[in-house]
Image (tube, rainbow, N blue to C red):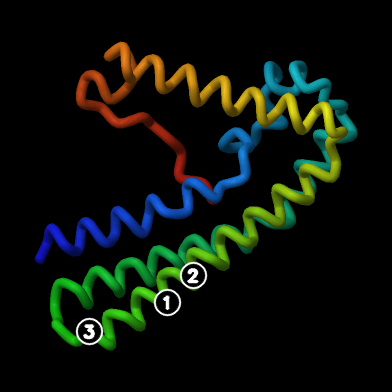
Amino acid sequence: MRRLVFAVLLLAAAAPLAAQPEVPDGKWWKRPRIAEEIGLTDDQSKQIEGIFVRNRPRLIDLKAELEKKQFDLQQAMEEGRDRRAIEEKIDAVENARKDLQKARALMVLDMKAVLKPRQWDRLREIVRENRERRRRLLEDGRGPAANGRRPNRKSQPR
């Protein structure tokens, strides 16, 4: 039963990754290398920071709600066999995930509106380059997973 719980939660956690808007994690607009590479102006950076600050409290609340729903589902799967109750909890998790993903996507859309098309394209290109670099490191056995460690990532709404 524990394996089933783990498998369901793992699948539920991995599903939205493919739907993520392609922007770097965290406050990418404050990273000098990225800002320089895409030609970000100070005014654009301030606008994007404002968008982030306005959206952050809601993203925090939505992420907390998702985590609560995931915990409820885990408990239900470990404790009971009431299929209908578990299905309702699965639906609750997916609805909470949908709300979080929608809020994040709309925030990214607002950020995208601040950028010129060439800046947006370059930002997405940087994300793809970084993803490819990490993939090569992992394949070569030099990435964080090579020595049994997981990458150290800050827990931020995406």
Instruction: Tell me residue 140's x, y (percent).
Output: 31, 11
In front here: 72 or 98? Answer: 98
Which residue is disc 2 drawn over? 96
Which residue is disc 1 drawn over? 92
Instruction: Tell me residue 72's x, y (percent).
Output: 30, 74
Q: Is residue 135 left or right of residue 76?
A: right
Q: Is residue 19 above or below residue 8?
A: above
Q: Secondary structure at mark 1?
A: helix
Q: Are marks 1 and 2 in contact (CB under 8 Å)?
A: yes
Q: Is residue 127 above or below residue 22?
A: above
Q: Are marks 1 and 3 in contact (CB under 8 Å)?
A: no
Nearer the N terminus, badge 3 or badge 2?
3
Q: Secondary structure at mark 3?
A: helix
Residue at 10% of width from left, 66% of height from top? 1
Instruction: Tell me residue 74's x, y (percent).
Output: 24, 68
Disc number placed over residue 10 in the picture, else none: none
Q: CA distance from mark 1 to mark 2?
A: 6 Å
Q: Is residue 25 left or right of residue 82?
A: right
Q: CA distance from mark 3 to mark 2?
A: 20 Å
In front here: 32 or 78? Answer: 78
3 vs 2, front mark: 3
Q: How many marks?
A: 3
Residue at 19% of width from left, 63% of height from top? 5
Q: CA distance from mark 1 to mark 3?
A: 14 Å
Q: Is residue 124 above or below residue 7?
A: above
Which residue is disc 3 drawn over? 83
What's the amino acid at mark 3? Arg
What's the amino acid at mark 2? Ala
**Few, some or many C-alpha atoms within 10 Å of disc 2 (few <14, some 14-19, many ≥20)?**
many
Res 142 quadrant in image: top left
What's the amino acid at mark 1? Ala
Residue situated furthest right in the rendering: 43
